[in-house]
Amino acid sequence: MEATSGADELVSGELVSVAHALSLPAESYGNDPDIEMAWAMRAMQHAEVYYKLISSVDPQFLKLTKVDDQIYSEFRENFEKLRIDVLDPEELKSESAKEKWRPFCLKFNGIVEDFNYGTLLRLNCSQGYTEENTIFAPRIQFFAIEIARNREGYNKAVYATVQDKEEKGANNGGDKGADSGGEEKGANQEREKEKTNKGGEKEK
């Protein structure tokens, strides 16, 4: 019991340390590999949850934050012509792009929780979170683009693809069940015929 208690305290202490480190600004920890790994794991978990969400629910009806309307309005006011179905990384990461995004992001400091946390963002919204299709972005940038993708119908492609696969899988399963039932019924009929024939032979 004492050993278990000690281990629990150690794990608890590590979690508190990681949580504290993650709450610090990036410059506080430099290139610490443990912290970078913790950030990456958190971002990946967030990405997996979000992708499951847009795969199982029509994205047009999703609400990602309490201020979706404000985020979308501000986003399209500032980035009216930005193409969001397939993102150009230069529109997010170049120096000129950063200058334009910075004031937009800072508007949501204190409004959106953890607005500047690192988050994974898909470049092509019709595809999943692959290495080639993913970039790192501040959380508010993720929200702005994904809210727009949901409202403008671009994320519908993911939802439709997943739903089609599930329907086909269900139909195939039903066909197999029907075939199995038919085979079993046929086998029973054959057995009944054999019994009838044997009974007739005995009477003779």
Image (cartoon, helix red, strand yellow):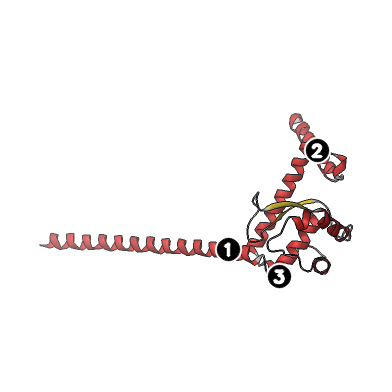
**Residue 62 visible to an observer of this rendering:** no
Q: Residue at x 13, y 60 (%)?
A: 201
The tag earlier along the polypeptide, 2 or 3, is: 2
Task: Name above or below for residue 35 compared with residue 192.
Answer: above
Q: Residue at x 75, y 62 (%)?
A: 145
Q: Position of residue 4 (x, y in %)?
A: 74, 32
Q: Is residue 158 left or right of residue 36?
A: left
> Could you tell me how far apart the alpha carbons at marks 3 and 1 are, in whole angstroms?
17 Å
> Could you tell me how far apart the alpha carbons at marks 1 and 2 are, in whole angstroms?
39 Å
Q: Position of residue 12 (x, y in %)?
A: 79, 38
Q: Position of residue 127 (x, y in %)?
A: 63, 58
Numbered circle sitting on residue 161: 1
Task: Name above or below for residue 112 compared with residue 23.
Answer: below
Numbered circle sitting on residue 152: 3
**Residue 9 visible to an observer of this rendering:** yes
The residue wearing badge 2 is 31
Could you say which quadrant of the image residue 18 lies in? top right
Residue reaching furthest to the top: 3
Q: Residue at x 77, y 45 (%)?
A: 39
Mark 1 residue crowding within 10 angstroms, few (<14) / some (14–19) / many (20+): few
Could you say which quadrant of the image residue 40 lies in? top right
Q: Amino acid at mark 1?
A: Thr
Q: Amino acid at mark 2?
A: Asn
The quarter of the image holding the N terminus is: top right
The tag earlier along the polypeptide, 3 or 1, is: 3
Mark 2 residue crowding within 10 angstroms, few (<14) / some (14–19) / many (20+): few
Task: Name above or below for residue 25 compared with residue 153.
Answer: above
